[in-house]
Image (cartoon, helix red, strand yellow):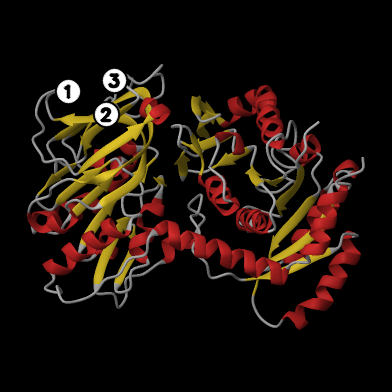
Amino acid sequence: MSRARSIMIQGTMSNAGKSLIAAGLCRIFRQDGLKAAPFKAQNMALNSYVTADGLEMGRAQAVQAFFAGVEPDVRMNPILLKPTGDTGSQVIVMGRVRGDYPARAYFAEKKKLLPVVEEAYRSLAEEYDVIVIEGAGSPVEINLKQDDIVNMGMARLAGAPVLLVGDIDRGGVFAQMAGTAALLEPWEKKYLKGLIVNKFRGDRSLLDPGLVMLEEKCCVPVAGAVPWMDVEIDAEDSLSGSFSSSAAGSLIDLAVIRLPRISNFTDFAPLDRIEGVGVRYVTSPRELGRPDLIFLPGTKNTMADLKWLRGSGLERAILALARTGTPVMGICGGYQMLGTRLIDPAAREEKSMEGLGLLPLETVFTDRKTRLKVSGHMADIAGDFAALSGARIEGYEIHMGQTHPAGSGEGEEATAPLTTLAAEGEAAAGMEGAAAAAEDAWTRTEGAAAGTVLGTYVHGIFDTKEAAEGLVRALAARRGLEGMAFTARDSAEFAREQADLVADTLRSALDMEMIRRILREGVQE
């Protein structure tokens, strides 16, 4: 018999705010002296996270673990789906790649994964006081309810009472909630214990009559109305508002190419928080303009997105700017694009494709997936980016393919390395298919720097204050702005402040006594 009590946050739709509400409750329970853990049976997202032991999980659950003050653990997200196109995903089970599945094939396979989900949940429940479970999408997507393992099916497995979250900012929140409640099956209605109206703006007194009617229609109490929160929390997918940022009026203009399959775009958030620096996402040559630096971000499908880059005209625009000295930096898939050639012997996307040719490197794709939590420092970098030299960095690698000097897999690099990295213990073995690391720890150089072109596999490379400020100082010097102060925030410190802000907001907006009672009483079948 597990000792943890559980509570589940479901939504009327995707992006209703389930992840943030769940994260805030994790923080509150921690502040109240309880050992809390997040859980989401199945997550679909391109923004992922690498754990300390070199396994992959959804970033939302990693953020929720941070809110709870515990180390992210793949048991908190046993199944992760990373879309590879409109009708298929890479399926990751307990942190390791199971394979690429078309949607129909995955739904046929999903029932077999129920024991994995159950074991992950049960083992967490033996170690924690409270499990905060997050659902996915809507619990009443009636075409997808068979063999459900992430909404009411998960609530039943865990015996978890459910709080339903609706997004009032999009409009129609009363119809969302009443319609969801009406479409629940009789046994499911026993699990629905409270309603939360999320993202409210305006005079709360004008909302109150509607909340009374909502309780009458749904026969479920309202646990609160949460105001719109102006917080910066790592987002799990491209539904995030991150892409709406603008560099208007900024001294330093950073342009991120918004690739169709962009992943781990949280890499750029620390730079966007620096006063005087603007980060904007562009999809056309007209939007690109003449930025101070162009970022090519991570992507789930490097070759497909490189083909899109060509078709959109952005490749031609980027190369023209690079020839005139505009710096270009690629991260992960973007780093692979900067080379001369990409080679996939298995021809999963294309057999071979020319890269942008800005770095003398080749990437060869294999079935092996690298997943590493790393730390280290920037190498000694010559030229315009010398201000980055020696800056401390922390981050992670998560990629298919290995990158080498063009024309060979061995030998001296034709470019200077960008970073010097270390990994220890199990993380040093964090490659798909590797039985064990050759040694318990290693140090190596990584990435490439050649004039004003930089590339790296390290996600989160600007999370430290030193690295973020070093990059901006270098760009400012190029603009003749050496005297300007550009101050970055350490990402971990900033995240702690944001976590406490979310918890404070939820404490004032939610009936926490009701929620504690719901948690204590559970569900009586």
Dot 1 or dot 2, earlier in sequence: 2
Horizontal relation, residue 205 to residue 212: left or right: left
> Is residue 90 rendered to the left or right of residue 183?
left
Q: Return the disc, 3 or 1, that comes first in the chain's sequence.
A: 3
Q: Amino acid at mark 3?
A: Pro
Residue 378, horizontal then vertical, whole percent: 21, 48
Total numbered circles: 3
Q: Nearer the viewer, residue 284 or 212?
A: 212
Category of crowding for the residue at label 3, using alpha-carbon neighbours closer than 10 angstroms: few (below 14), some (14–19), many (at least 20):
few
Helix or strand or loop: what does disc 2 sit on?
A: strand
Which one is nearer the viewer's eye here, 350 or 376?
376
Asked which secondary structure carries label 3, the reply is: loop
Residue located beneath label 1 in the image: 409
Q: Residue at x 75, y 55 (%)?
A: 164
For residue 232, the mark is none
Picture coordinates of residue 409 (x, y %)? 17, 23
Q: Along the horizontal axis of the image, is 107 left or right of 147?
A: left
Would you name the residue on which mark 3 appears? 345
Q: Amino acid at mark 1?
A: Gly
Name the residue at 56% across, 29% down: 94
Compare marks 3 and 2 and give the one earlier in the sequence.
Answer: 3
**In the image: residue 282, left or right of residue 19:** left
Which numbered mark, 3 or 2, is in the foreground of this view? 2
Q: CA distance from mark 3 to mark 1?
A: 14 Å
Between marks 3 and 2, how big is the CA–CA gap?
13 Å
- Whole-angstrom CA distance, mark 1 to mark 2, is 9 Å
Q: Residue at 30%, 78% (x, y): give it.
A: 249
The residue labelled by disc 2 is: 402
How packed mark 2 is, by other alpha carbons closer than 10 Å (few <14, some 14-19, many 20 or more), is: some
